[in-house]
RNA sequence: GGUCUCUUGGCCGAGUGGCUAGGCAGCGGUCUGCAAAACCGCGUACGGCGGUUCGAAUCCGCCAGAGACCUCCA
């Protein structure tokens, strides 16, 4: 495991060795959710991806400060109408709720979903609404440095001016000339010097209910500002890693770079990481496209295109089985495959606990360990790491079958490796076990029935034996006749 | 239209100049009163056409198809 962690930096479009700015410590910022509706499968991807990063960095012994924001001030949604209405305000009107009530509701639901997916809580989860002052201060410094201008109560970022000294578009690989020729002219933007300028502060129209006072106007902060302001506040002027979905690269992250650079005089982020999208029917899953499935629907199997429910760990496994920079295709078949695969992996961990050691090992699993870590070190290649884990699964099963042997010492090590890799780093957890979902009463009841079935079998009363098995199966309790006895589990 | 990316066996997905992941499904076997489960074994696939090379799925060119960003978006 002496190898170095290498990550793909969107900024340079290359894999680079990761060296923290301060040895032993990492500052990590990830764009969090806008809390105005339930999270869908697509949202799970970045949070699981960067959860893996968070876990792995921690596992490597680094002290990580992980900041993931909650966007709860809403941003302009409907340009076509000409008025521009706050997304959260719009939802509030529809549901007859206070805006902050909407925020609270969906923030809670987001947290529940993340807990279910075993996504660790970030070190700091700042809310945009709680950092209006910091955002205003950042606008001040941008304006003071000459890169922002006020127009009719709103403040805009002067992209052209910025581009004279810095390079606008460096992250997404564009240059301002291209942007000039390709930016759509939108209505109601006459306040701006150029159509590609973006808002730092937006004056609120009378019907806009989410608003804060400022020296420019009663309004709300611009679309990209919160991340710049909050990352600076909690991680400093310069920090190590900024993550988010690929679709945020432009304009969101591009604007963040511009804002931070314009206000601080230097770039903030050293490594930019972007996860790819989840596709459904060949197209990206997105709220705006209406082709999304919420996590809640997935967990409950409650959506027309779902053939069954898929557990949170199945979702996690599904996502981790693809590299984070590749797209993944959603399908029932793929999710079922993930569920089965995960089951097999978890079963092997149990098997590992039951193995009895021999004097000497007949196999060497050290290469396997190394390969796993090599994979993770290579830009977080979780699918490869998982593939090697399955080699370990096979070894484990062969040992159980008596075809291979393992020494006591090796067994301890193998167990510890599997536990740290599967639970600590990849972040899987047991689900559906009796302790959590059924309780002791169920366990006792099933054991009783199993005893009756055993008696029936001894008496060759197959009718009774099969009835017990089939009825239990119908109730969702699966029996497995093994050499050692009868195992059972909830389906 | 501009910029960029992708196309791998039935499905999902790694890999990226020679050693040809992994999971699921399928098939065969072991186990079993039967069944299920579990376990073991089995698959030489890389869009098309050219080129470079001793050798390409992997590099280059062209063509076809799909997608992402350019507007809120994970």
Image (cartoon, coloured by chain):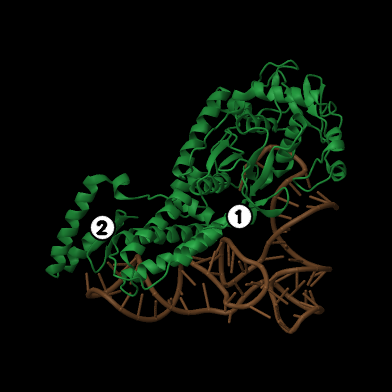
Q: What's the colour of chain B in the image?
A: brown
Question: Is residue A477 in view?
Answer: no
Residue A181 percent across, percent down from the top left: 88, 43
Indicate whether B62 appears above or below A27. Answer: below
A346 sits to left or right of A167: left
Q: Quadrant of residue A395?
A: bottom left
Q: Residues within 10 Å of mark 1 (few under 14, many from 20)?
A: many
Q: Residue at x 65, y 47 (%)?
A: A273
Q: Nearer the viewer, residue A150 or B25?
A: A150
Q: Nearer the viewer, residue A56 or B45?
A: A56
Whether residue A428 is visible to the viewer of this picture, yes or no, is: yes
Which x, y percent locates residue A6?
62, 54
Residue pointed to by mark 2 = A471
Q: Which chain is green?
A: A
- Residue position for label 1: A379
Q: Position of residue A381 (x, y in %)?
A: 57, 57
Q: Residue A237: which quarter of the image?
A: top right
């Amino acid at each position: 495991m002496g190898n170095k962690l290498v990550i793909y930096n969107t900024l340079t479009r290359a894999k680079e060795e990761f060296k923290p700015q301060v040895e032993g410590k990492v500052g990590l910022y990830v764009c969090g959710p806008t809390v105005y509706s339930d999270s869908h499968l697509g949202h799970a991807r970045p949070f699981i991806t960067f959860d893996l990063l968070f876990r792995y960095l921690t596992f490597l012994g680094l002290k990580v400060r992980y900041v993931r924001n909650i966007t709860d001030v809403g941003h302009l949604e409907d340009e076509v109408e000409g008025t521009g209405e706050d997304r959260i305000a719009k939802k509030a009107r529809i549901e007859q709720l206070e805006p902050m009530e909407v925020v609270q509701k969906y923030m809670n639901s987001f947290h529940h979903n993340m807990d279910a997916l075993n996504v660790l809580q970030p070190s700091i989860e700042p809310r945009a609404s709680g950092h209006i002052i910091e955002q205003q201060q950042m606008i001040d410094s941008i304006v003071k440095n000459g890169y922002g201008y006020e127009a009719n109560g709103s403040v805009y970022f002067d992209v052209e001016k910025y581009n004279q000294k810095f390079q606008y578009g460096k992250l997404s690989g564009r240059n301002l000339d291209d942007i000039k020729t390709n930016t759509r002219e939108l209505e109601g933007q006459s306040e701006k010097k150029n159509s590609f300028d973006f808002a730092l502060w937006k004056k609120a129209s009378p019907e806009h209910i989410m608003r804060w006072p400022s020296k420019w106007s009663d309004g709300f902060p611009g679309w990209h500002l919160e991340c710049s302001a909050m990352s600076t506040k909690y991680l400093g002027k310069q920090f190590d890693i900024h993550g988010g979905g690929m679709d945020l690269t432009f304009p969101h992250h591009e604007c963040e770079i511009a804002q931070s650079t314009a206000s601080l005089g230097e770039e903030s982020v050293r490594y930019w990481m972007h996860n790819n999208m989840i596709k459904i029917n060949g197209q990206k899953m997105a709220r705006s496209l209406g082709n999304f499935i919420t996590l809640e629907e997935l967990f409950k199997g409650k959506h027309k295109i779902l053939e069954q429910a898929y557990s949170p760990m199945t979702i996690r496994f599904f996502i981790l089985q693809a590299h984070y920079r590749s797209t993944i295709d959603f399908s029932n078949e793929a999710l079922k495959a993930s569920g089965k695969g995960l089951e097999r992996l978890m079963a092997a961990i149990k098997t590992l606990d039951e193995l009895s050691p021999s004097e000497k090992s007949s196999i060497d699993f050290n290469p396997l360990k190394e390969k796993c870590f090599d994979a993770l070190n290579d830009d977080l290649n979780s699918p490869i790491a998982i593939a090697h884990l399955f080699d370990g699964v096979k070894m484990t099963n062969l040992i159980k079958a008596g075809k291979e042997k393992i020494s006591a010492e090796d067994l301890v090590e193998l167990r510890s490796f599997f536990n740290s890799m599967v639970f600590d780093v990849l972040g899987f957890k047991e689900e559906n076990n009796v302790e959590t979902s059924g309780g002791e009463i169920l366990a006792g009841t099933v054991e009783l029935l199993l005893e009756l079935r055993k008696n029936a079998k001894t008496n060759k009363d197959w009718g009774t034996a099969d009835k017990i098995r089939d009825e239990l199966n119908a109730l969702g309790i699966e029996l497995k006749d093994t050499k050692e006895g009868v195992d059972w589990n909830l389906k």
